[in-house]
Image (spheres, coloured by chain):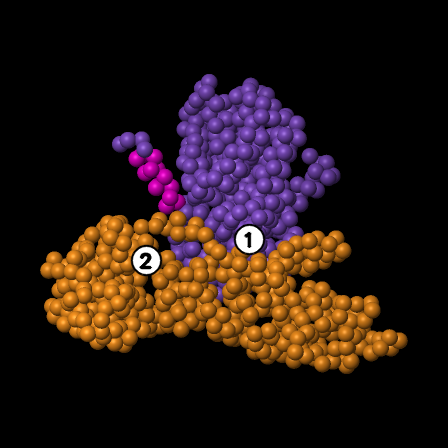
């Protein structure tokens, strides 16, 4: 083998020597690998830790010649006594072997069995984590039998740019150490699934490391108990910021589960308008239209033109989740008609809203059971259903995705298929 | 109320039961029935006192497992891997697989005993039971299966009733419970190690910790976790106590008044212990006893290989879930299937009249392994880096270390005795 590529487990424990053949002197054994900039996509190995009876020594990568014919690592210079570890530095074996990481591509929490390195761009770099059975056999030193066995097995490697370590690599570092952006890149529901697999402490830390919006998206997909424990761990101020970014109906559900005083503390941290909306929503039973609805919808006046309305959507759309239906109301918020985005786009710019809107309205009362709301939405093929009070005033809308969530049993949701495994295996067969 | 709704109610009631209760129910398995019965039948009330320190140790040890699960969000196998590296983990997992397969075999031995009582051939019943276990796990919801078995565990209450109906000498019961007595008789030491091994089985800590993690309990749920563990442990041991009393008041009592030698563990048969249920069930005692061990055997034979496969896959970070296909989780299904098939196969290979001895000595082996597990748990749980503010208090440390040292000492003395033949 050469000191160019391979698995760390195959290098650990090998004898390190200084000098050439007749005058070789043993200085110790390879124990660990030091990376000074772990945040790089494929981090460079900067030094080897050589362990001997007199302690741990550092051999800079530049001082390494190669493995000789006997499999010994030949060094050009004597390794220096190890300095106290740098806060930033990562010790691959000590810090990462056997630890849990998030496989960003496969979307799950796995364990590192081995690490693959390769020489690219003039440096020895960490390229992949081995999470499979092959890595275990190699670590256990299976010998030739083990090698024959591992060659037959499918390789289960995760490219390093898809690896996100979970634990603080160094107790003095407070933040999640490797680029949170790798986690932020996940779909919120996948991220939520990973968070659900973590301990309360890690879950709060991962959510805390995301920006408010990403954290809110992930939180929306978590079950009530996990949400609550994360909110508790984050502290009122940060929690309030995140809840503000959540869909109003999800935020209200979350708040509804908290004790009154805790709820108040969070609401006080929010801006007045959001807090006011949420206070109204919290009052409804979770399993009714009122509990499912969001106040985040688009409303317009009937005497506007189509062109003016489209301009208004452009202006408001970035802040509104649901823009596919527009609700036409009078000044007392009484619902007059509904307009789909499709109708709007197909109408002449000068048409007035009241001439193109649908006035044959389907709506529900806030006290209607969630299953009945779902059947209403299904029967009329709606994307959302308005919720009106006794006087016909708009209170909010229930969207089709929230209606589905409300009627699928919790147990079934967990069994919904995930399409990640196959995808990953294929991407590695190409490598 | 119509029976259907009553049934649903009962299931709902058990739905709120936590991991502690389920673990305690799984703990009163075939090996438990065998060991408690043998202890009561051979020594009478004087072994009852061992249950008192055992209760304390069981609660302390299980609380440690529950706390580690709630704080770290990882199972015990995962923590061993992170704290001790891959070699020790490999050895620990190999040992766990070996022992759990042995315990699975004892569960099938219980099913074989049921077959014997009903004059059915074990060569038909055991393969059939193997198929049933596979179907239960692969076709039904795990939680549902668990709850149904826990409901059926109510059959253990027959030991409570039978123990009372047998009109034991309550003075002797109280004396036996409160005053530690050692017997010089052959087999006392091995019985005590067996009692420890079956009450605090090594697999139960893995099982409980994973269940706590699975339930999503965090540090703020710790008191709920603890309450569940305490209630589950006390109920489990109370039932064990009544098994001992029922056997002491019948089999042991009869031997004493007839001046016959007490039961010989090395020749006893499972069926012999059915007599402990005669005060309750009369002629149906054997049938009742048979259904008791059938339920216990099927329950643990279902739960244990599955839990073992999960735990080992957790340690090695391999794919593990019942809802995956075979080719997606080959190691998981491989471990699960080999655990069941090896366990069932072992029972078919052993001679029928040695199944009870096999079951009994498997518990003794569990008692011998327990100290090693406790040492690993104690090292991990005292690391601030892992547990933060939730490391062990000195009192818990003292009890847990004392448990490990006493059991380790007893096991060593027993092994020395067997080798040098002083007994």
- As measured in the structure, the alpha-carbon distance from the residue carrying label 1 to the one carrying label 2 is 31 Å
Name the residue rendered at 70%, 56% in the picture.
A151
Chain letter of mark 1 equals B
User: Quick one: which chain is purple?
Assistant: B
Tag 1 secondary structure: loop
Residue B398, x across and y down, in percent: 53, 55
Instruction: Please tell me in which quadrant of the rendered image residue B314 appears.
Output: bottom right
Query: In the displayed structure, would residue A279 be above or below residue B235?
Result: below
Residue A313, x across and y down, in percent: 26, 73
Q: In this orientation, which residue lies closer to the viewer: A309 or B165?
A: A309
Total label count?
2
Q: Main secondary structure of the magenta part?
A: helix
Please determine if labels 1 and 2 lie on a single subunit: no
Name the residue rendered at 63%, 25% in the picture.
B353
Query: In the displayed structure, would residue A27 be above or below residue B101?
Result: below
User: What is the number of the mark on residue B319?
Assistant: 1
Instruction: Please tell me in which quadrant of the rendered image residue A258 appears.
Output: bottom left
Tag 2 secondary structure: helix
**Residue B262: in magenta span:** no
Q: Residue furthest front?
A: A348
Name the residue rendered at 52%, 75% in the picture.
A172
Mark 2, residue position: A401
Q: In this orientation, which residue lies closer to the viewer: A156 or B168?
A: A156
Quarter of the picture containing the C terminus of chain B is top right
Please say whether residue A112 is visible from this viewpoint: no
Q: In this orientation, which residue lies closer to the viewer: B372 or B119?
A: B119
Instruction: Please tell me in which quadrant of the rendered image residue A61 appears.
Output: bottom right
Q: Is A3 on the left-hand or right-hand side of A397?
A: right
Range of magenta residues: B5-17
Chain letter of mark 2 equals A
Q: In this orientation, which residue lies closer to the viewer: B387 or A170?
A: A170
Name the residue rendered at 57%, 59% in the picture.
A426
């Amino acid at each position: 083998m050469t000191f160019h590529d391979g698995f760390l487990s195959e290098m650990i424990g090998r004898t390190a020597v200084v000098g050439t053949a007749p005058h070789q002197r043993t200085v110790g054994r390879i124990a660990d690998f030091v990376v000074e900039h772990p945040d790089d996509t494929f981090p460079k190995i900067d030094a080897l830790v050589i362990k001997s009876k007199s302690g741990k020594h550092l051999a800079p990568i530049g001082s390494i010649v190669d493995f000789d014919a006997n499999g010994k690592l030949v060094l050009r210079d004597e390794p220096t006594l190890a300095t106290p570890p740098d806060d930033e530095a990562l010790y691959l074996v000590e810090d990462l072997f056997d630890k849990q990481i998030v496989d960003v591509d496969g979307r799950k929490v796995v364990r590192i069995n081995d690490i693959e390195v390769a020489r690219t761009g003039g440096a020895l770099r960490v390229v992949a984590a081995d999470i499979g059975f092959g890595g275990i056999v190699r670590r256990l030193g299976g010998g030739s039998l083990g090698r024959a066995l591992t060659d037959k097995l499918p390789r289960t490697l995760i490219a390093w740019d898809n690896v996100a370590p979970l634990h603080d690599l160094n107790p003095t570092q407070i933040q999640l150490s490797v680029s949170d952006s790798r986690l932020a890149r996940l779909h919120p529901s996948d991220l939520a699934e990973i968070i659900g697999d973590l301990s309360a402490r890690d879950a709060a830390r991962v959510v805390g490391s995301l920006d408010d919006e990403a954290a809110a998206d992930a939180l929306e997909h978590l079950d009530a108990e996990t949400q609550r424990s994360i909110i508790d761990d984050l502290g009122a101020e940060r929690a309030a910021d995140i809840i503000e970014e959540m869909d109003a109906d999800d935020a209200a559900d979350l708040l509804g589960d908290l004790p009154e005083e805790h709820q108040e503390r969070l609401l006080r941290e929010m801006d007045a308008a959001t807090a006011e909306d949420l206070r109204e929503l919290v009052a409804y039973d979770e399993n009714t239209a009122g509990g499912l609805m969001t106040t985040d919808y688009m409303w317009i006046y009937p005497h506007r033109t189509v062109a003016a309305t489209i301009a208004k959507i452009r202006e408001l759309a970035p802040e509104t989740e649901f823009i596919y239906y527009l609700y036409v109301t009078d000044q007392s918020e009484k619902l007059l008609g509904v307009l789909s985005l499709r109708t709007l786009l197909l109408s002449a710019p000068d048409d007035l809203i009241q001439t193109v809107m649908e006035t044959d309205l389907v709506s529900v009362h806030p006290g209607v059971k969630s299953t009945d709301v779902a059947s209403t939405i299904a029967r009329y093929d709606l994307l959302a259903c308005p919720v009106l009070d006794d006087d016909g005033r708009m209170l909010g809308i229930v969207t089709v995705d929230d209606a589905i969530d409300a009627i699928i049993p919790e147990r079934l949701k967990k069994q919904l298929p995930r399409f990640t495994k196959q995808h990953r295996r294929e991407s590695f067969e190409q490598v | 109320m119509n029976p259907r709704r009553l049934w649903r109610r009962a299931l709902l009631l058990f739905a709120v039961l936590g991991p502690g209760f389920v673990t305690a129910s799984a703990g009163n398995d075939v090996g438990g029935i065998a060991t408690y019965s043998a202890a009561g039948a051979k020594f009478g009330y004087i072994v009852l006192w061992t249950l008192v320190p055992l209760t304390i140790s069981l609660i302390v040890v299980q609380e440690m497992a529950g706390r580690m699960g709630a704080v770290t969000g990882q199972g015990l196998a995962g923590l061993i891997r992170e704290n001790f590296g891959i070699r020790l983990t490999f050895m620990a997992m190999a040992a766990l697989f070996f022992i759990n397969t042995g315990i699975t075999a004892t569960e099938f031995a219980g099913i074989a005993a049921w077959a014997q009582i009903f004059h059915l051939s074990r060569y038909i019943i055991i393969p059939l039971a193997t198929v049933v276990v596979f179907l239960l796990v692969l076709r039904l919801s795990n939680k549902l299966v668990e709850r149904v078995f826990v409901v059926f565990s109510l059959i253990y209450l027959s030991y409570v009733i039978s123990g009372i109906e047998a009109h034991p000498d309550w003075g002797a019961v109280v004396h036996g419970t409160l005053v530690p007595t050692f017997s010089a008789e052959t087999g006392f030491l091995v019985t005590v190690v067996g009692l420890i091994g079956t009450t605090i089985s090594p697999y139960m800590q893995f099982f409980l910790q994973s269940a706590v993690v699975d339930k999503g309990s965090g540090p703020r749920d710790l008191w709920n976790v603890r309450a569940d563990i305490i209630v589950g442990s006390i109920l489990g041991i109370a039932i064990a106590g009544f098994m001992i009393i029922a056997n002491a008041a019948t089999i042991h009592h009869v031997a004493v008044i007839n001046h016959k030698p007490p039961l010989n563990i090395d020749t006893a048969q499972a069926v012999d212990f059915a007599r402990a249920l005669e005060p309750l069930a009369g002629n149906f005692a054997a049938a009742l006893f048979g259904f008791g061990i059938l339920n216990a055997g099927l329950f643990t034979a279902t739960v244990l290989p599955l839990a073992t496969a999960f735990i080992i896959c957790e340690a090695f970070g391999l794919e593990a879930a019942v809802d995956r296909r075979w080719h997606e989780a080959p190691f998981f299904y491989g471990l699960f299937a080999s655990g069941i098939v090896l366990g069932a196969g072992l029972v078919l290979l052993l001679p029928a009249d040695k199944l009870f001895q096999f079951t009994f000595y498997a518990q003794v082996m569990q008692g011998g392994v327990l100290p090693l597990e406790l040492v690993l748990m104690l090292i991990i749980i005292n690391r601030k880096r892992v547990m933060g503010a939730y490391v062990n208090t000195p009192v818990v440390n003292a009890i847990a270390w004392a448990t490990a040292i006493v059991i380790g000492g007893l096991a060593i003395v027993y092994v020395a005795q067997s080798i040098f033949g002083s007994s």
